[in-house]
Amino acid sequence: MTTPAPVRTDAAVIALVGMAHATSHLFHLLLPPLFPLLMPDFGFGYTEAGFLMTVFFVISGVGQALAGIVVDRYGARRVLMAGVSLLAASGLALSAAANYPMLLLAVALAGMGNSVFHPADFSLLNKKVSPSRLGHAFSAHGLSGNLGWALGATISGMALAWGGWRGAGLAAASVAFCSVAALQMARRLLDDDVARFPAGTHGAGAGGTATETTFGFLGAPVIWLSFLFFLLVTAAFGGLQSFSVPVLGGIYGLTAAAGVAALTGYLLGSAAGMVVGGFVAVRVQAHDRAVGAALVGAAVFASVLASGLPPAWSVIPLMVGVGIGVGLAGPSRDLLVRRVAIESLAGGKESPAFGRVYGFVYSGLDVGLALGPLAFGMLLDAGGRGGVLPGVALLQILAVLTVLAMGRRVGPGR
């Protein structure tokens, strides 16, 4: 039995990691709202604009799987600081861009910076926060990402209003530099020991499913189930985030403003669900069932929306309901992934492969965000507007089946 760390120490770690996570999400939503300004200035169209985001997600997804290896070798704090520094460089590159290739450079730097956050963040939280407070830590981590999206949208919105996309790049870089400074000042609090288990350690974990060579963890089927779960969940989220405004407008006759209000309701509901989900996660042991129940609820709300039967005034409350279900699932989801890593690896959270498991599993987020909007966009181009919301519900149900399969392959929660 280990003595829990003081509440103030845990809170400081959670706040620092959350600040870095919010910075990464700021850069998620920095560029797309600026396209109306960037496209005429640089003379490119929607295809080139879409390619910029493809570059971001491809680099982030591949980099995330590799970043876990770097975290295990050099420590999560160092990698986290490097990632935030790359984001700062991305903001500066955007502010100085003179042509399309320089925009590509800014996006590539942002993708590389974004790739480190899940393996570094979750390695730090698992090593530095008392287990009894991890549910709240994961809740705060998810909530900080939502706050980062809001900050990114705010910076871009100010740029749209004042016509200053270069200023948006400088503002985002300034936020990233402040995050780097805070991480540097708190380096003693966040330093993690990477030498307890020397590189090349082998062995099976409690589940006896993976050896600890560099890529030995990929031999555990539950790792692939975890990757698939994140792909499915974020493909649904990506489609809903990208196309809810035109889809809801087509089904319910909502104006663009009302559609944006419905999407905002979804995001606020998700944030509220994460807060409540943190309390749920620390009180339940069957995290797979908690995630499944929350996502089934979200799928039910999405199916009701897809039917087109409710009155138009109910769209916003129903979107809030979808968001609450997705948010509720978040903290329990992250604790379940922690169980997957601990049960699959020798040494549990101190395993030399712990960071790379997080890096690979959470790279499913980037794959889902890259494929979901593409698939739903093709569906819309083919005239299948009515299939988007049923598709979102179907992906959530498939995610439920996947998470229940994950739960059957690991031991009871602890």
Image (cartoon, grey):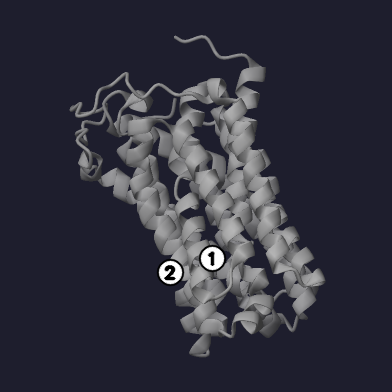
Rendered view: 371 above or below 404: below
Residue drawn at 25 percent across, 40 percent down: 217
Is residue 354 visible from the viewing direction of this image? no
Residue 189: x %, y % from top left: 56, 21
Q: Is residue 358 left or right of residue 208?
A: right
Three-letter residue code for mark 2: Leu
Rendered view: 130 above or below 277: above
Label 1 close to label 2 by CB (< 8 Å):
yes
Residue at the extreme bottom of the image, as rendered: 383
Give the crowd class for mark 1: few <14, some 14-19, many >=20 residues within 10 Å: many
Q: How many marks?
A: 2
Q: What is the quadrant of the N terminus in the image?
A: top left
Q: Is residue 134 left or right of residue 225?
A: right
Residue drawn at 48 percent across, 32 percent down: 77
Residue 369: x %, y % from top left: 48, 63
Is residue 362 visible from the viewing direction of this image? yes
For label 2, the SS is helix
Three-letter residue code for mark 1: Gly
Rendered view: 56 above or below 332: below
Rendered view: 245 above or below 75: below
Residue tagged by mark 2? Answer: 371
Q: Of residues 103 and 72, which is closer to you in this image?
A: 103
Residue drawn at 25 percent across, 31 percent down: 207
Residue 227: x %, y % from top left: 36, 51
Give the crowd class for mark 2: few <14, some 14-19, many >=20 residues within 10 Å: many
Q: Is residue 138 left or right of residue 348?
A: right
Distance from Cα at disc 1 to Cα at disc 2: 8 Å
For label 1, the SS is helix
Residue tagged by mark 1? Answer: 238
Residue 315: x %, y % from top left: 73, 70
Q: Of residues 22 and 140, which is closer to you in this image?
A: 22
